[in-house]
Image (tube, rainbow, N blue to C red):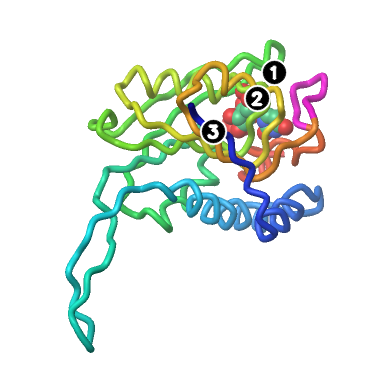
Amino acid sequence: MAKTLILNHPLIQHKIAIMRDKTTGTKAFKELAKEISMLMCYEATRNLATKDKEIETPITKTTCKVLAGRKLAVVPILRAGLGMVDGMLALIPSAKVGHIGLYRNEETLEPVEYYCKMPSDIEERDVFVVDPMLATGGSACDAIKLIKQKGAKNIKFLCLIAAPEGIKKLEETHPDVDIFCASLDEKLNEHGYIVPGLGDAGDRIFGTK
Ligand code: PRP
Ligand code: URA
């Protein structure tokens, strides 16, 4: 059974508070998304397998733990998910990056797919799907369905802000996927925006509004 983890570390909460502030500009918003993604990556990679390696320090020989070398992939949901990629790659630089383009139809709130390009060996990789916002959960559920269709089996989902509705839908639709989230907010409003949320993550990352 998968788990949902709310990462209420003080550093994460502090940075999320600044991101929520409507006076925070694009440059700071982007930097904070990267920093929080790094902190979340640290937690989401906690169970990566390690193996023993003999190392000679300047003092003596010793046995150390190193990563066992499982292949990893980071898959941002375009556009806003791009804001989390650099933070992830700062900690797992050898991960390959796949892209899924989805946008929400503003009336139906249903996700519409417009792009999908995965690493050719995605079925061998542990996949971290990233998107700052989990609102109705439609985009995350569809993205994960597509990635599973390409053969990936071990998938985790990381978001900055989630609504209870999105968590419920993702847990029910993909019970095998662990969810890592920096803040679980109160609810969705009548336009499908997270309350209190941080507004439109894509627009705030790319300065399009
Ligand atoms: C936002 C966000 C998620 C989606 C979440 O993307 O980045 O992908 O909405 O909403 P949901 O859980 O109800 O599906 P948006 O559709 O605004 O596209 P963008 O990233 O291109 O701005
Ligand atoms: N997408 C966003 O960018 N923000 C929300 O609050 C909901 C969906």
Please report whichever mark, 3 or 2, sits nearer to the chain's N-terminal start.
3
What residue is pinned by disc 1? Answer: 106
Residue 134 versus residue 14 in the image, above or below = above
Amino acid type, mark 2: Gly
Could you tell me which residue is drawn at 76 percent across and 47 percent down? 20
Circle 1 crowding by C-alpha within 10 Å: few under 14, some 14–19, many from 20: few
Please report whichever mark, 2 or 1, sits nearer to the chain's N-terminal start.
1
Amino acid type, mark 3: Lys
CB-based contact (under 8 Å), mark 3 and mark 2: no
CB-based contact (under 8 Å), mark 3 and mark 1: no
Residue 130 versus residue 31 in the image, above or below = above
The range drawn in magenta is 187-194
Please report whichever mark, 3 or 1, sits nearer to the chain's N-terminal start.
3
Q: 51 or 131, which lies in front?
A: 51
Disc 3 is placed on an element classified as: loop
What residue is pinned by disc 2? Answer: 166
Q: Magenta includes 135?
A: no
Q: Magenta includes 191?
A: yes
What residue is pinned by disc 3? Answer: 3
Q: 191 or 94, which lies in front?
A: 94
Could you tell me which residue is drawn at 51 percent across and 38 percent down? 130
User: Where does the image place residue 42, in percent across and percent down from the top left?
Assistant: 48, 54
Amino acid type, mark 1: Glu
